[in-house]
Image (cartoon, helix red, strand yellow):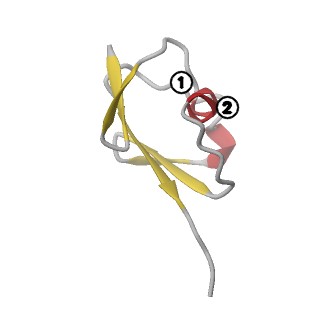
Amino acid sequence: MTIEVNTAKVEWVEGETIVDLLRRMNFIYPMLVIKIDGAVIPKSRYAEMIIPDGSVVEVIHLESGG
C-alpha cells in the first residue's frame, strides 16, 4: 500500500494525518499548500485529515521575496 507524495511513491500509514506525513517527510517550510487527489486542503484541517491509501498528495512550498 502506497501513496504518492510529489511524484514519489511513499509507504501508506494507516490513520496518518497531513501533520503526521509532513513530520515524517521532514517538510518544515511554514508556508505550504497541500492537495490530496487534486483538492486543496485547508490548513485548519491538517491535524484531522487522514490520508487515504492510494492518494496523490502534492506539497507545494510557497516562497516570497523581492
| Res 27 quadrant in image | top right
On screen, 54 above or below 14?
below
Q: Which residue is mark 1?
A: 50
Q: Determine the residue positioned at 62% across, 27% down.
A: 20
| Res 56 quadrant in image | top left
Q: Name the amino acid, label 2.
A: Ala
Say what secondary structure mark 1 lies in.
loop
Distance of label 1 from label 2 (alpha carbons): 8 Å
Q: Name the amino acid, label 1.
A: Ile
Please tell me how crowded label 1 is: few (under 14), some (14-19), or many (20+) other residues with Cα within 10 Å.
some
Residue pushed farthest bottom?
66
Q: Quadrant of the C terminus?
A: bottom right
Q: Nearer the viewer, residue 30 or 15?
A: 30
On screen, 40 above or below 50?
below
Q: Quadrant of the N terminus?
A: top left
Q: Which residue is mark 2?
A: 47
Say what secondary structure mark 2 lies in.
loop
Q: Determine the residue positioned at 47% across, 26% down.
A: 51
Q: Determine the residue positioned at 56% across, 64% down.
A: 62
Q: Position of residue 48 (x, y in %)?
A: 64, 28
Q: Determine the residue positioned at 60% across, 37% down.
A: 26
